[in-house]
Structures are given as C-alpha cells and as structure tokens.
Image (spheres, rainbow, N blue to C red):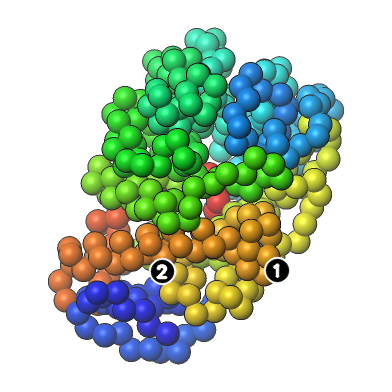
Amino acid sequence: MIWKHGNTWFDPVTLRISVGTPLEDGGAEVPPAPDAPAAAVQAVVTRRCNLSCGYCNVRLSGDSPDDMTPETADRVIKTAADAPPGRLVMVTGGEPLLLPDIAFRILERVAPPKVLFTNATLITMEIASGLKRMGVSPVVSLDGMESAHNSQRCGSWARAAEGLDILRENGVPYGISTVVGHHNWRGIGTVMEQMFRRFMPTSMGFNILHWTPGNFDPIPAESYSDAVGSVFNTALRHGIFVDQIARRIDPIVSGVYRHRDCAALGGKIVFHPDGRTSNCISGRSMEDWSMRIPAGMEYCAQCHAAGICGGGCAWDGIHLGGSLKPDARHCMWVRHILDLFLEDVEKHFPAGSVSRVELKKRYGMLITRGGSPLTASIGHRE
C-alpha cells in the first residue's frame, strides 16, 4: 500500500517519500520487531506530592501513599547496574523532591543517562547544584503560562518558574513537559513559543491525558490532534525538540520502522514505593504487552502511519481501545502529523525521490541535538 497525500507519495513500510513521481509498490513486508530495547528503569520514590492536580494518573491510580525504603532504592541501583548499555534511569513521584534522601541516593549511584521528573516547586540552589554535579537532567511539569498552568496545577506557576530559573542559573539542562487538556489546548503553538522564549528548555513535550479510573476528562481526539499539529508547526519554525514530534519523524529520516512507542512494551521495569515492580507506572505487575504494537494488531494493518506509530500507550489502548486495538486518539494525531510532514516535504523538495540525507538536513533539529538524554525521547526509545 502506497499512501498519497497531495502530490507526495509515502511508503508506510519502507518509509520512502517521493514528490510528484509515484512510488512503485514493491510489496515489502513489515520488518520483524527487534529485541526489547535497552532497559529503562523507573523509580517511583513516593506517591506523595505537594500539589494535587486533578488529572494526575499517579495519584488517581494508586492506593499506596508509601515512600520508598532504602532497601528498595538499592534494588533500583542494582537493576540499573545490571541493565544493558544505554539503559535510562528515571526518578519520579508523586513529587520525588519530597523524599530527597532516597531520590539522591539513587541518582548519586547510577550512571548516566538519568532523569528526574519534578514540578520544580521545591528546587533550591543547593538541589540544583547537586543535580548539576550528578549529571541529572530534570524534566519539569509546566502546563503553559501562568493562568493556564495555575488552573490545573494548584496555583504553582510562580514557584515552578522560580525553580526553572534556578536550574538555568546553575547550568542544568532541563526539559518541560506539558499535559494538553481543556485548560490549554487552544492556541498551544503560541503558548509553546512563549514558554520556549521564557525558559529556553533543552526539550519540550506535549502529552495526551492518560486514562485513569476516575476523573478522566480528556479533550476530544480532534482537539488534541489540532494541538499537536500546531506544536509541529511551531517546532519546525523554531527548530525545537519536541518528544512527540521527534519519535514520529525520526523513523522517516532514519528509514527504520518504529515498532514500539514506549519501553513498557518491552525492556522497562518500574519500582513502586512499596517494592512491587511492573512494566508501567499505571500498572501493579509485569505484563506482556509485546503484541500491542502495530505489527501485532490487525486493526493497524492498512494504516499509512503504522511505520512511525509504535502503537501508542498500551495502557490507554487497553482501557480505551479494547482487545488489540490502540487508543483512537493516538491514531488520529499521528496520522495528522504524518500528513503535515508530507505537506512540508512537498513544499520544500523538488520532484522525485527524496533522500534521507536531505531529509536530515531539514528535519534533523527536530529529532536530536545530542549530548543530553532530553533530546532522545525519554522513556520512548525503540
């Protein structure tokens, strides 16, 4: 199946592109899924938080307020040490800086790459200096500028902004992670540009609202699709690395079919505060989700975006898509990004086959800039 969008042809299996000249359907088969990626090790050091954001999937999906013990932290450290080269360590909460001794116990003892997810409201000069010394890359939750952020994140914008400024003053590279919802999706491309100019993050992310057993109130799929399309256009205009965009475009530029959209589909282990382990922060046990990839779901067989998709979030797919179907919201926005990408290719490339070298020249800044785990799609590597 060759997909045609405008005057551009796209092969969803080989990921070839041609402008103005039809591609021959070579009948290529989907390549076999590679072995599980290098392990991602996530430590949920506490479920407590100094905020109580209404959409928090950690708060709503858990029944244990326990803090992680030193013994469980040492299990995290050993697992990270025994993992394959290239593994990523993520320290999360709740708000992990409510338990700095345990968070730093792990971060101090594991090798890079290592990432701390935080709301930044507890960051001090001392903490920022420690993160810099340990080579930790923080990812900070920020849902836009002041009014939008405060509407969902408990009026914490001023404190979060101060924390980001402290990180920047100490030379700590950081990313910004935004949950897209009713409070901020309209005009989000403009808001993205405002956040980038104000804080100059190394990376940005614009996340779909994950399913939770209560208080799940997402924006319509069309609205999220429009929002991410606006993010794509802003990222392309300013050369900004955006996690969701990078992992859609990288397969096309590299020519490597993307099978998995999350390490939870193979290669990830999450340590919960009470010592239990799972492959997903929302789950409570290790699950085999290996078939929840496009190559394993018949529903995806004729989708022109299957080669860049990875199947989306398996947790959302299970609860919103059903048996071996993905989350339909994911399907819609990924197809939209592919179509916008092909439109841009047609606008900027001459007729004929488009080489990957030329694609990298134009889109390379959207994929990675190297030197930081923040520019390599955290927790979503194939």
Quarter-wise, where is residue 271 in the image?
Answer: top right
Other residues around mark 1 within 10 Å, as few (<14) / some (14–19) / many (≥20): few
Which is more toward the observer, 241 or 331?
331
Q: Where's residue 267, x and y in %?
A: 68, 54
- Quadrant of residue 295 within the rendered picture: bottom right
Q: Amino acid at mark 2?
A: Gly
Q: CA distance from mark 1 to mark 2?
A: 30 Å
Numbered disc in front, either 1 or 2: 1
Task: Give residue 280's mark.
Answer: none
Q: Nearer the viewer, residue 275 or 281?
A: 281
Residue 269: in sight, yes or no?
no
Q: Is residue 254 above or below residue 19?
A: above
Label 2 Cα crowd, 10 Å radius (few <14 / some 14-19 / many 20+): some
The vertical placement of 103 against 345, above or below, is above
Amino acid type at image mark 1:
Ser
Q: Quadrant of the C terminus?
A: bottom right
Residue ID for mark 1: 323
- As drawn, is 368 to the left or to the right of 39? left
Outermost residue toward the left in this view? 350
Residue 334 can be seen in this image: yes
Closest to the observer, 369 or 21? 21
Q: To which quarter of the image does residue 323 belong?
A: bottom right
Q: In front here: 110 or 245? A: 245
- Residue visible at 71% across and 62% down? 289
User: Which numbered marker is on residue 255?
Assistant: 2
Q: Residue at x 63, y 25 (%)?
A: 52
